[in-house]
Image (cartoon, rainbow, N blue to C red):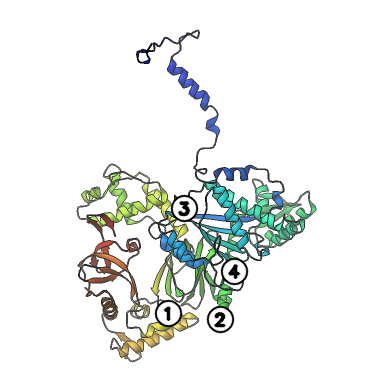
């Protein structure tokens, strides 16, 4: 028969003793196939990407003698380069090459797989279009035994290339300015084919560290009994969290009791010595025999003690290096969570990393109260740059539900749980669209950070009944990464402020109703001297008068000084651009291309270029991500109210 004429004839299923429906058989087969799988771990995406299988092997293999292996840390941090990310990448490369990181106290030098001195600008240029990059910190516990870390890092990165199945483009800097030598590595987020480099989380968490441990153990040999014993003896008196403490915490019972006894005499002496040290600092109590009771949150307390010790050593080192005469009582750790905390105003001595592994930054500030303050400012290099010598005000942030959140919840409650700009304007006819847009921006930030708020394709938002609880969780998360606000009061050093023809921080303090208290000691003494010189300058400029030992200032003095500087700077810019300056006045609508930021003594300003002229208006952080774009806004008394600009090429939000 011809194939085209073939027609299959399907018969009935054979009987199995009783009538069974075919669908029932399929369902039962599916159940049998899935039986037992529900008990397996759920899919979490940790094995998506390169290196997953290698990491699995490294974790599961029987590592004989692991107790004697050298210890190492490899900290990965993926960083998105969109928006301000490229600027953050430049800042990161600058920071890791800062002064004093080599053994000789010199600035660090970038190196790569084939070059001892790598070109950081060329590296950034190659990664201009990259979606992301990886920043690594590699630290071997016994790294001080390496005369040079470069060969170790190159072998580690070469092994990672084999594990990930692609060549890697990276630069690195070795740091020897801490107790543990370590290396910062910046890795491009592209593979050898030019596609996005996706590394499995399992490799990031375990694979790279296991490779570093293996290489260090191969180089330095397994840890000897003497090395292990010396480390444990040193840990018995340490005021930080140690391996001995972790073991005691694992072994304590429900009422926090732990035994000092051990089958090994040396281990027993170590445990006993450590428990006695914990008792002396109030973290353990001897309850009789070999039984001890550990205090609640022992690990957290010891971690904080270790951090405090590191802070005190950092403050001592920097104060000594700058020849600052400050008594130990005048060294303060700024705690934003303290009940009686007040903002700190002072001069930036330095910015640094309190914890390089966790990317926690700090500022050391010489306060006008005559004391030196250590203030943790948060995580990430994208924090606003604060140059040394700048005068800043540091204040604690407050985690709270804002008025904008209450408004969103109110509008959604009256609109079936949906928030949108149109619903907002219907709910409050007196509101303007720009005001409603600010609420949308708040929701967008929460959505990107928490992933707990849904946005529909039409631009509306699903607001659940527990929205305010989500806001509280969001604010607490933000607070952990940004515990304080840092306001730059002056980028000019205090010694230059008395003679500057502009509205300065000193001027604002002189005319303030409640000026910042200034102590006649330390940096406060320098500020008082600068204030006295500034008064004389203002009198000479006929902006102040002195009578009977009292100085009175001309009304509108700050505005006049600010306008004098504005016109002077605008004249300089006009000569460069070949365009006239158009002064922005209250109520004017501003629209043009955002060229950049202009640093002035009276504050940062935005340079807006228009078709026939340009203008200068006060800067706002929201403009950071819109350089080179068209922005628009309305001049208000308190600044600029930026709005949505729609062009033929598409919308721009400023």
| Pick the front one: 281 or 450 | 450
- Residue at 25% from the left image edge and 59% from the top image edge: 643
Disc 4 and disc 1: Cα gap in Å? 27 Å
Instruction: Point out residue 162 in the picture as x, y percentages from the top left corner.
Output: 57, 49
In this picture, residue 404 sits left or right of residue 327 = left
Q: Nearer the viewer, mark 4 or mark 1?
A: 4
| Pick the front one: 604 or 334 | 604
Q: Which residue is mark 4?
A: 177
In the rendering, which numbered label is found on residue 323? 2
Sequence-wise first label, 2 or 4: 4
In the rendering, which numbered label is found on residue 190? 3
Q: Is residue 88 visible?
A: yes
Disc 3 and disc 4: Cα gap in Å? 31 Å
Q: Nearer the viewer, mark 1 or mark 3?
A: 3
- Residue at 53% from the left image edge and 31% from the top image edge: 37
In this picture, residue 616 sits left or right of residue 347 = left
Sequence-wise first label, 3 or 4: 4
Q: Which residue is mark 1?
A: 493
- Describe the element under mark 3 as helix, strand or loop: loop
Disc 1 vs disc 2: Cβ atoms closer than 8 Å? no
């Amino acid at each position: 028969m011809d194939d085209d004429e073939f027609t299959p004839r399907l018969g009935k299923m054979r009987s199995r003793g009783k009538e069974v429906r075919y669908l029932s058989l399929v369902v039962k087969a599916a159940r049998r196939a899935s039986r037992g799988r529900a008990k397996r771990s759920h899919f979490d995406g940790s094995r998506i990407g390169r290196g997953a299988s290698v990491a699995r092997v490294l974790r599961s293999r029987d590592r004989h003698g692991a107790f004697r292996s050298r210890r190492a840390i490899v900290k990965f941090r993926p960083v998105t380069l969109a928006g301000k990310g490229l600027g953050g990448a430049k800042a990161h490369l600058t920071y890791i090459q800062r002064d004093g990181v080599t053994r000789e106290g010199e600035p660090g030098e970038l190196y790569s797989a084939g070059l001892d001195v790598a070109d950081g600008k060329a590296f950034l240029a190659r990664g201009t279009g990259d979606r992301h990059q990886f920043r690594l910190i590699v630290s071997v516990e016994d790294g001080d035994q390496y005369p040079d870390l470069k060969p170790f890092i190159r072998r580690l990165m070469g092994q990672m290339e084999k594990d990930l199945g692609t060549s890697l483009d990276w630069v690195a800097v070795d740091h020897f300015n801490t107790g543990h030598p370590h290396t910062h590595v910046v890795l491009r987020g592209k593979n050898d084919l030019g596609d996005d480099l996706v590394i499995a989380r399992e490799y990031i968490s375990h694979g790279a560290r296991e490779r570093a441990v293996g290489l260090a153990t191969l180089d330095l040999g397994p840890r000897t009994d003497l090395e292990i014993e010396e480390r444990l003896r040193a840990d018995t008196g340490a005021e930080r969290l140690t391996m001995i403490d972790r073991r005691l915490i694992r072994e304590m019972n429900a009422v926090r009791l732990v035994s000092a006894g051990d089958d090994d005499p040396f281990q027993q002496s170590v445990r006993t010595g450590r428990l006695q040290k914990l008792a002396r600092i109030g973290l353990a109590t001897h309850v009789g025999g070999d039984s001890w009771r550990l205090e609640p949150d022992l690990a957290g307390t010891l971690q904080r003690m270790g951090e405090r010790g590191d802070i005190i050593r950092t403050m001592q080192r920097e104060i000594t290096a700058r020849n600052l005469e400050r008594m130990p009582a005048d060294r303060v750790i700024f705690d934003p969570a303290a009940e009686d905390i007040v903002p700190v105003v002072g001069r930036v001595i330095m910015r640094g990393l309190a914890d390089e592994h966790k990317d926690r930054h700090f500022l050391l500030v010489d306060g006008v109260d005559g004391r030196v303050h250590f203030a943790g400012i948060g995580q990430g290099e994208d924090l606003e740059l604060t140059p040394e010598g700048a005068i800043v005000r540091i204040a604690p942030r407050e985690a709270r539900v804002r008025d904008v959140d209450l408004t969103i919840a109110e509008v959604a409650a009256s609109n079936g749980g949906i928030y949108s700009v149109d619903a907002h304007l219907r709910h409050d006819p007196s509101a303007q669209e720009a005001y409603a847009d600010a609420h949308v921006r708040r929701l967008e930030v929460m959505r990107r950070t928490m992933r707990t708020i849904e946005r529909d394709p039409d631009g509306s938002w699903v607001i659940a009944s527990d929205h305010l609880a989500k806001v509280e969780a969001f604010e607490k998360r933000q607070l952990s990464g940004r515990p304080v606000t840092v306001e730059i009061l002056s980028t000019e050093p205090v010694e230059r402020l008395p003679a500057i023809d502009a509205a300065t921080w000193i001027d604002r303090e002189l005319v303030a109703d409640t000026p910042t208290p200034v102590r006649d000691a330390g940096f406060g003494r320098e500020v008082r001297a600068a204030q006295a010189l500034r008064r004389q300058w203002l009198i000479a400029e006929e902006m102040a008068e002195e009578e009977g030992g009292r100085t009175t200032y001309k009304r509108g003095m700050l505005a006049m000084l600010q306008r004098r500087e504005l016109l002077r700077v605008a004249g300089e810019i006009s000569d460069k651009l070949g365009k006239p300056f158009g002064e922005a006045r209250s109520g004017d609508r501003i629209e043009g291309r955002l060229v950049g930021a202009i640093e002035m003594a009276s504050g940062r300003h935005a340079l807006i270029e228009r078709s026939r002229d340009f203008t200068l208006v006060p800067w706002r952080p929201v403009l950071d991500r819109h350089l080179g774009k068209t922005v628009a806004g309305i001049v208000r008394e308190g600044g600029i109210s930026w709005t949505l600009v729609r062009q033929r090429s598409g919308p721009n939000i400023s």
